[in-house]
Image (cartoon, grey):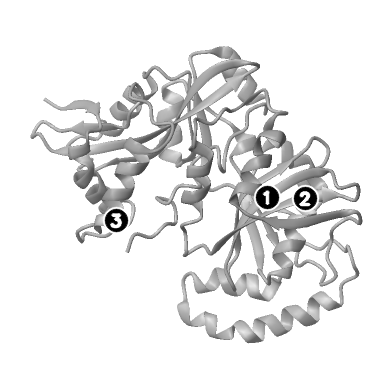
Amino acid sequence: MSEIRSLERADIPAIAGMFQRVFRNDQSTPPPALADYMQQLYLDAPGCDPQIRPLVHVNDKGVISGFVGVNVLPMVLNGRRLRAAICGSLMVEDRESDPLAGARILKAFLAGPQDLSFSETASDVSVQMWTRLRGVVLPQYSLDWVRVIQPASFSLSVASNRIKPARLAAPFARAIDSAYRKRMAPGEQRWSAVSAAGIGQAGFTAQETDRDGFAAVVDRFIAQFPLRPEWAEGQLDYILGDAEQKPEQGELVYAVVAARTGTLVGAFAYYAKAGAIGRVLQVLALPGQAGPVIDCLVDHAAKRGLPGLRGRTQPALMEAMLGRRIAFVHVYSTVLHSRDPAIVQACRDGQGFFNGIAGEHWCRLIAGTFG
């Protein structure tokens, strides 16, 4: 008979192999670095909780055939301490012989002792399983936003993901973009591009910083959220350090945004790689200051020559984004489950700080490499 139990260290090689086959469509033996990373991530990282563990599904032959990755994030709701469980990789092999294995694993995970469970990368199939188990979709957290900076280079970057030789046209695309953007007036808003003179408001400046400088201001900017992380010792530094190790996405650039008076009003972190659309990990802003922070982010990426930016929405940023020629697409959903109606309502009302560093996109299992 099949069973579901907590992940053990001896399971790690099997889990790494399953991840390689299911998510990377690679039948070869996984590199040792992948197994080492999964052990660190799921069993040894700051914040790991012995009561809330990743789960494995063992079939009736005694073989591990399913897995759900779990990371614990301490949180607080109006002063009340909570434990959130982030649902990461949910995978099942041999679905034909046991089509309900995935649903059983998810049900066992949601029945754990955590106060709330969530995922920001739920596929359509996963969403159906979550909602059948009384989970809810959070639409305001479930969109990706896209800002085009250099139209020709942006199109080329998208095309080169499928057609590698398209990259040879990069110099030609940059020349087109330069001529087009120089014809735009300073501050002019177009869907197709950003002016070469920038779009930022006078009086706000972005200053690059390092990991420690960014981490030092995070709590200041998330204090506005009734439901927010209360990081375990060393956890935020671990998250940012892990996020930095994604060479395929580029350098992780940190910056803080200040008003003319010197008051810090926000911060952002995004990946910058020449010729590639920058992936935004996090945007932070004081209430009412999201607009200037977003403008500074776009201008900063434009000065680095990026063709565009892409990030994940949060309700606190949506109003400012609507007037800034930012497009929205739905790829994955943010889903939440809790037995406490107050927690669910707070999240429905956009009062929770989720996604980015309080989610999954920092993790190297997403867009990371392991040799």
- Residue designated by label 3: 33
SS category of the residue bearing label 1: strand
In this rendering, position of residue 60 left or right of residue 205: left
Which residue is located at x 50 percent, y 47 percent? Answer: 362
SS category of the residue bearing label 2: strand
**Type of the residue with mark 3:** Ala
> Compared with residue 191, is residue 332 higher up or lower down, i.e. above or below?
above
Q: Is residue 312 visible?
A: no
Image marks 2 and 1: residues in contact by CB distance under 8 Å: yes
- Residue designated by label 2: 257
Classed neighbour count for the residue bearing mark 3: other residues with Cα under 10 Å, few (<14), some (14–19), many (≥20):
few
Which residue is located at x 82 percent, y 56 percent? Answer: 205
**Type of the residue with mark 1:** Phe
Residue 326, quarter of picture: bottom right
> Compared with residue 169, is residue 312 higher up or lower down, i.e. above or below?
above
Which residue is located at x 70 percent, y 42 percent? Answer: 284
Per the model, the C-alpha gap separating discs 3 and 2 is 37 Å
Residue 203 point in image, percent of width and height: 91, 54
